[in-house]
Amino acid sequence: MIRFGPAGNSEAFYNEGHKRTTEAFKWLHKMNLDAFEYQCTRGVLLKQNTAEEIGAEAKKYDIRLSLHAPYYINMAGTEKEKLQKSRGHIEKSIRAALWMGAKRVVVHPGGIGKDSRDAAMKRAISFFNDIIKNQPSGELISPELMGKINQLGNLDEIIRFCLVDERIIPTIDFGHLNSRTKGALNSPEAFENVIIRLADGIGWERTRRLHVHFSRIEFTEKGGEKKHWSMKDTQFGPEFDHLVPSLIKYEMKPVIISESRGTQAADAKLMKERFLGCI
Ligand SMILES: [Zn+2]
């Protein structure tokens, strides 16, 4: 079974008068959605009782939770103090995820800064390895494929992170991958090649259980990712329909999160309908 849901609350949710995320799960269930990514991108600010309330509501409506960790994390940092802060953000994210029963903690690996890509990657892997080995439930961490070229997290790098521990499931953001490859993700074959490269790297068992982010993303030739758009903004790729044949052919069971700007729940529903229309 493939699960679909939004990243955070949509504009429609608030426009209908809702204020608290605890109200989101009944709302999503009515839309026939069954996943939700809680956003801690500006810091892990929620308290234990709120997180537990969210977890209970999500469970009641069978909504699979994931949590997006703060943007401030940089596993490739060179300063001890900053690395310590990144570690703190990850630890708090894991704690909040456990409170709410979230199954994944999505983390951005970080930027390469002024260093060489290789040196930055070595530092990030060492940091990541340390977290996985020493942090209880560190296996919840899901390194995300990133959209900007100067960020760590191209497809091969994400595979390398996953090789640190066989329990690690990657977050494959196809909009990001399309951005950093300047629109190369433009056919069903291109998507299938990504799935095969992943399976070669981390095996089919993990590849079938991917955590997926999907949205149309504008990019620049030089830098990659520029801006997230919604499903109706068809001038920007990639096309969800190009992923569907691989989902079916390889019997994949991912969680697919829409990161559309403002319309993420409606767009998750749209993707689910497109998928169901093909099986
Ligand atoms: Zn992200």
Image (spheres, grey):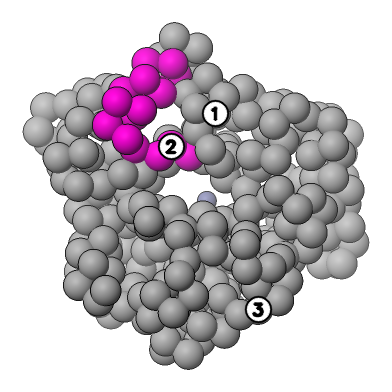
Q: Quadrant of residue 70?
A: top right
Marks 2/1: CA–CA distance: 8 Å
Determine if the C-beta at disc 1 is less than 8 A from ligand 1: no
Q: Residue shown at 36%/28% (left/top)?
A: 59
In the figure, 264 relative to 180: above or below? Answer: above
Relative to 159, 114 lies left or right: right
Secondary structure at numbered mark 2: strand
Above or below, 19 against 7 in this view is: above
Question: Mark 3, residues whose alpha carbon is within 10 Å: few (<14), some, or many (≥20)?
Answer: some
Residue 54 is one of the magenta-drawn residues: yes
- The crowd level at tag 1 (other Cα within 10 Å; few <14, some 14-19, many 20+) is many
Mark 2 or 1, nearer chain start: 2
Q: Which residue is mark 1?
A: 97
Q: Is residue 151 magenta?
A: no
Q: What's the mark number on residue 65?
A: 2
Residue at coordinates 28% horizontally, 51% vertically from top-left?
Answer: 264
Identity of the residue drawn at 75% across and 27% down: 136
| Circle 3 residue | 197
The answer to whether residue 5 is seen in the rendering is: yes
Contact, mark 3 vs mark 2 (Cβ under 8 Å): no
Q: Which span of residues is magenta-colored?
A: 51-67
Asked if the residues shown at circle 2 and circle 1 are in contact, with their CB atoms under 8 angstroms apart, the answer is yes
Q: Position of residue 181 (x, y in %)?
A: 57, 80
As measured in the structure, the alpha-carbon distance from the residue carrying label 1 to the one carrying label 3 is 29 Å
Q: Which kind of residue does numbered mark 1 sit on?
A: Ala
Point out the image quarter for the N terminus.
bottom left
